[in-house]
Structure formats: structure tokens, C-alpha cells
Amino acid sequence: MRMKSIVLSLAAIALGAAALAGPAHAAKDDFTFSENEILDKAIGFFGAITKGLAGAIQKVFEDQGRPNGLIFGEEASAAFGIGVRYGKGKLNRKNQKLLQIYWQGPSVGFDFGGNASKVMVLIYRLDKTEDLFRRFPGVEGSFYFVAGVGVNYQQSGNIVLAPIRTGVGLRGGVNIGYLHYTREHSWIPL
């Protein structure tokens, strides 16, 4: 009888722990995006999922986990040793309204050409939307690249951005630079 009581007590403790873990896990899920959600949103944005795009998304999830923000947008860039990049898009966070944002930035390096891209940016550890409006350094050329889809990481403080780009144009090389995310459009890339 005593053994049965111990087993029942352990079962009750396990059920209580599971009940406590359930809402905490669900709360986390309320503010982050799953890989399937990202793939569905990517289909809606890019029109289809290529093997390269699916592989890039999977790679970012392996490296960083579940994002708590997304940007879907477009950008154009050009470089002849010194480069510029301009973009605009919509910030998407769970349980919040879409927010129009812009980005621009300079680069320098062994980089030549120009391109226009559709961009999906996965955002990690963004506590407050205001924290996005700053400069994020990054290195182009040291990114994961497969089947016309490129990914690089940008980090400022604890926040990590993973822009996934696919587009048209001819641009090659390696550069360093930053992107400055803002609420208003600016032609000044600094």
C-alpha cells in the first residue's frame, strides 16, 4: 500500500510539473515563430520555396533557434570597392501590428557589381521594437550560400539578425559594413 502511495505521489508531482511547463512553453511559442510558420510565410512572400531557400531557413534555425521577429522587404545594392545598400520592409512580431521600417548602410572591401533582392530577416532576442533601430555590423562574403540564396549574420549587443536574400544582379566579392535600421527613409547610408 505504501508503494502505491509513493507511485501516486510521484505521478501527481510529474503531472504538476508538466502542467507548469506547459503554459511556460506555450507562452514562449506565443512570441516566437516556428520553422513551419517561417516556411509558410516565405512561400507567401517569395511565391515558392526552393530547395536553397528551405535549406537556408533550416541552417538559420539550427544556428539560432526560433526567431521572435521577422522583416519581409526588398533592397538594392551596388559596389565598386565602396558600396551602399538600401532597403525597406515590414517588421512582423507576434501579437503586434506590422511596422514599416527602412535600412541603409555602407560597405568597403573587394566587392563589385549590383543587385536587387527580396529579403526576409529573421530576428533573435529582440525584447523591445525600439532596440532594432540601430546599426548592425556584418561581413558579407562569409555567409552560407546555396542555390541563389544567401544568408549572413549581423549582431549588435544581444540582438542577432539573419537576412536571407534572393534576387537578381551580378555582385561578387567580400566586404564589411553595417546596416542601420530606421523608422524613416534616408538616402544617407551612414
Image (cartoon, rainbow, N blue to C red):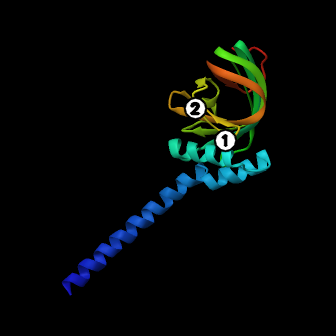
Q: Is residue 161 left or right of residue 9?
A: right
- Disc 2 on helix, strand or loop? loop
Crowding at mark 2 (Cα within 10 Å: few <14, some 14-19, many 20+): many
Name the residue furthest bottom. Answer: 1
Residue 15 appears at what percent x and percent y? 39, 71
Residue 97 appears at what percent x and percent y? 73, 44
Quarter of the figure with residue 69: top right
Which residue carries the number 1 mark?
Answer: 70
Q: Residue 90: in sight, yes or no?
A: no
Residue 30 appears at what percent x and percent y? 59, 53
Question: What number of labels is visible?
Answer: 2
Q: Is residue 156 above or below residue 1?
A: above
Amino acid of disc 1: Leu
Q: Which mark is residue 189?
A: none
Q: Is residue 147 above or below residue 4?
A: above
Quarter of the figure with residue 26: bottom right
Is the N terminus in the top left, top right, bottom left or bottom right quadrant? bottom left
Q: CA distance from mark 2 to mark 1?
A: 14 Å
Q: Which mark is residue 153?
A: 2
